[in-house]
Amino acid sequence: MLSYAVGHREAIDAVTQWRDLGLQKFELEDHEWVILEQLHDVLKDATLCFSRTTPNLAMVFPAMDHVDRMLVSYSYNKKYLPSIRSAVWLANNTLNHYYQLTDRSQTCRISMVLHLQHKLAYFKAAQWEDGWIKTTEQVVHKEFEDLYSSINNNSDTGCEDDVFESNNDV
Protein backbone atom coordinates (compact mmCIF):
# COMPACT_ATOMS: atom_id res chain seq x y z
CA MET A 1 0.00 0.00 0.00
CA LEU A 2 2.81 2.37 0.91
CA SER A 3 4.71 1.45 -2.26
CA TYR A 4 1.60 2.12 -4.30
CA ALA A 5 1.03 5.54 -2.72
CA VAL A 6 4.66 6.60 -3.19
CA GLY A 7 4.65 5.37 -6.77
CA HIS A 8 1.42 7.18 -7.61
CA ARG A 9 1.98 10.44 -5.78
CA GLU A 10 0.98 12.64 -8.73
CA ALA A 11 -2.28 10.80 -9.27
CA ILE A 12 -3.12 10.84 -5.56
CA ASP A 13 -2.37 14.55 -5.36
CA ALA A 14 -4.55 15.23 -8.40
CA VAL A 15 -7.51 13.23 -7.09
CA THR A 16 -7.38 14.70 -3.57
CA GLN A 17 -7.34 18.26 -4.96
CA TRP A 18 -10.70 17.94 -6.73
CA ARG A 19 -13.22 19.83 -4.64
CA ASP A 20 -16.24 18.04 -6.07
CA LEU A 21 -14.95 14.68 -4.79
CA GLY A 22 -14.64 15.97 -1.23
CA LEU A 23 -11.21 14.38 -0.76
CA GLN A 24 -9.23 17.53 0.10
CA LYS A 25 -9.03 16.51 3.75
CA PHE A 26 -6.88 13.55 2.61
CA GLU A 27 -4.44 15.65 0.61
CA LEU A 28 -0.86 15.33 1.86
CA GLU A 29 1.43 18.31 2.17
CA ASP A 30 4.99 18.15 0.85
CA HIS A 31 6.54 17.46 4.26
CA GLU A 32 4.05 14.61 4.77
CA TRP A 33 5.11 13.08 1.45
CA VAL A 34 8.74 13.26 2.63
CA ILE A 35 7.81 11.37 5.78
CA LEU A 36 5.84 8.84 3.75
CA GLU A 37 8.73 8.29 1.32
CA GLN A 38 11.27 7.88 4.14
CA LEU A 39 9.00 5.52 6.01
CA HIS A 40 8.54 3.52 2.82
CA ASP A 41 12.31 3.34 2.39
CA VAL A 42 12.87 2.06 5.91
CA LEU A 43 10.02 -0.45 5.93
CA LYS A 44 10.85 -1.78 2.47
CA ASP A 45 14.45 -2.56 3.41
CA ALA A 46 13.70 -3.80 6.91
CA THR A 47 11.12 -6.33 5.75
CA LEU A 48 12.72 -7.45 2.50
CA CYS A 49 14.69 -10.25 4.14
CA PHE A 50 11.47 -11.85 5.40
CA SER A 51 10.01 -12.12 1.93
CA ARG A 52 13.03 -13.63 0.16
CA THR A 53 12.72 -17.25 1.22
CA THR A 54 10.35 -19.56 2.96
CA PRO A 55 10.74 -18.83 6.65
CA ASN A 56 11.97 -21.54 8.97
CA LEU A 57 13.09 -21.67 12.56
CA ALA A 58 16.79 -21.74 11.73
CA MET A 59 16.44 -18.45 9.86
CA VAL A 60 15.07 -16.56 12.88
CA PHE A 61 18.46 -15.52 14.23
CA PRO A 62 20.03 -14.45 10.91
CA ALA A 63 16.88 -12.56 9.89
CA MET A 64 16.54 -10.80 13.23
CA ASP A 65 20.24 -9.92 13.30
CA HIS A 66 19.92 -8.47 9.80
CA VAL A 67 16.86 -6.40 10.68
CA ASP A 68 18.53 -5.20 13.88
CA ARG A 69 21.61 -4.00 11.97
CA MET A 70 19.42 -2.21 9.44
CA LEU A 71 17.24 -0.51 12.04
CA VAL A 72 20.27 0.64 14.02
CA SER A 73 21.74 2.04 10.82
CA TYR A 74 18.52 3.91 9.99
CA SER A 75 18.17 5.29 13.50
CA TYR A 76 21.55 7.04 13.18
CA ASN A 77 21.28 8.07 9.53
CA LYS A 78 20.91 11.87 9.34
CA LYS A 79 19.34 11.49 5.88
CA TYR A 80 16.08 10.66 7.66
CA LEU A 81 13.94 13.08 9.61
CA PRO A 82 14.27 12.97 13.41
CA SER A 83 10.72 11.59 13.64
CA ILE A 84 11.61 8.66 11.37
CA ARG A 85 14.88 7.99 13.24
CA SER A 86 13.03 8.06 16.57
CA ALA A 87 10.32 5.72 15.31
CA VAL A 88 12.94 3.33 13.95
CA TRP A 89 14.84 3.44 17.26
CA LEU A 90 11.64 2.64 19.18
CA ALA A 91 10.76 -0.14 16.74
CA ASN A 92 14.22 -1.64 17.17
CA ASN A 93 13.90 -1.54 20.96
CA THR A 94 10.57 -3.35 20.69
CA LEU A 95 12.04 -5.88 18.27
CA ASN A 96 14.97 -6.55 20.59
CA HIS A 97 12.65 -6.96 23.57
CA TYR A 98 10.91 -9.85 21.82
CA TYR A 99 14.09 -11.14 20.17
CA GLN A 100 15.63 -11.63 23.61
CA LEU A 101 12.78 -14.01 24.41
CA THR A 102 14.31 -16.48 21.93
CA ASP A 103 17.04 -16.98 24.55
CA ARG A 104 14.43 -18.94 26.49
CA SER A 105 13.71 -21.20 23.53
CA GLN A 106 15.79 -24.34 23.46
CA THR A 107 14.15 -25.21 20.16
CA CYS A 108 15.57 -22.09 18.47
CA ARG A 109 19.06 -22.80 19.77
CA ILE A 110 18.96 -26.45 18.79
CA SER A 111 17.61 -25.70 15.32
CA MET A 112 20.52 -23.35 14.63
CA VAL A 113 23.15 -25.80 15.84
CA LEU A 114 21.66 -28.65 13.81
CA HIS A 115 21.23 -26.53 10.69
CA LEU A 116 23.79 -27.62 8.09
CA GLN A 117 24.78 -24.07 7.21
CA HIS A 118 24.76 -22.36 10.60
CA LYS A 119 25.88 -24.47 13.56
CA LEU A 120 27.71 -22.58 16.31
CA ALA A 121 29.89 -20.96 13.66
CA TYR A 122 27.06 -18.52 12.86
CA PHE A 123 27.06 -17.12 16.39
CA LYS A 124 30.85 -16.87 16.45
CA ALA A 125 30.93 -15.08 13.09
CA ALA A 126 28.17 -12.71 14.28
CA GLN A 127 30.24 -12.06 17.43
CA TRP A 128 27.63 -13.23 19.90
CA GLU A 129 28.75 -13.43 23.54
CA ASP A 130 30.90 -16.46 24.31
CA GLY A 131 28.74 -17.31 27.33
CA TRP A 132 25.61 -17.47 25.18
CA ILE A 133 27.36 -19.71 22.65
CA LYS A 134 28.66 -22.02 25.40
CA THR A 135 25.19 -22.24 26.95
CA THR A 136 23.73 -23.09 23.54
CA GLU A 137 26.29 -25.85 23.09
CA GLN A 138 25.45 -27.20 26.55
CA VAL A 139 21.70 -27.13 25.75
CA VAL A 140 22.25 -29.23 22.64
CA HIS A 141 24.55 -31.66 24.46
CA LYS A 142 22.04 -32.04 27.29
CA GLU A 143 19.13 -32.57 24.89
CA PHE A 144 21.14 -35.17 23.00
CA GLU A 145 22.10 -36.96 26.20
CA ASP A 146 18.52 -36.88 27.53
CA LEU A 147 16.97 -38.18 24.33
CA TYR A 148 19.56 -40.35 22.66
CA SER A 149 22.11 -41.58 25.18
CA SER A 150 19.94 -44.57 26.07
CA ILE A 151 19.87 -45.78 22.46
CA ASN A 152 22.19 -48.73 22.06
CA ASN A 153 24.63 -47.64 19.39
CA ASN A 154 27.56 -50.04 18.96
CA SER A 155 29.22 -47.99 16.22
CA ASP A 156 31.03 -44.92 17.52
CA THR A 157 31.62 -42.66 14.53
CA GLY A 158 33.50 -39.99 16.45
CA CYS A 159 31.48 -37.30 14.62
CA GLU A 160 29.79 -35.81 17.67
CA ASP A 161 31.66 -32.49 17.45
CA ASP A 162 30.73 -32.10 13.76
CA VAL A 163 27.27 -31.05 14.89
CA PHE A 164 28.66 -27.90 16.48
CA GLU A 165 31.26 -26.61 14.06
CA SER A 166 30.97 -26.10 10.34
CA ASN A 167 33.70 -27.07 7.93
CA ASN A 168 34.63 -23.40 7.74
CA ASP A 169 35.64 -22.81 11.35
CA VAL A 170 35.43 -19.21 12.40
Image (cartoon, rainbow, N blue to C red):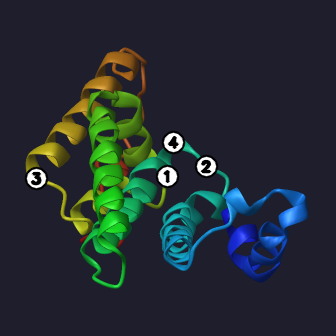
Q: CA distance from mark 2 to mark 3?
A: 27 Å
Report the amino acid beneath label 2.
Pro
Q: Quadrant of the C terminus?
A: bottom left
Taking depth in this image into account, of 42 and 60 the one nearest to the observer is 42
Q: Position of residue 158 (x, y in %)?
A: 32, 47
Q: Which residue is mark 2?
A: 55
Taking depth in this image into account, of 76 and 15 the one nearest to the observer is 15
Q: CA distance from mark 4 to mark 1?
A: 5 Å
Mark found first going from the N terminus, 1 or 3: 1
Q: Which residue is mark 4?
A: 57
Report the amino acid beneath label 3.
Asp
Q: Which residue is mark 1?
A: 59
Q: Are marks 2 and 3 in contact (CB under 8 Å)?
A: no
Q: Are marks 4 and 1 in contact (CB under 8 Å)?
A: yes
Q: Which residue is mark 3?
A: 130
| In the depicted structure, whether residue 104 falls above or below residue 90 | above
Q: Position of residue 165 (x, y in %)?
A: 30, 58
Q: Tell me the SS state at disc 4.
A: helix
Q: Tell me the SS state at disc 3.
A: helix
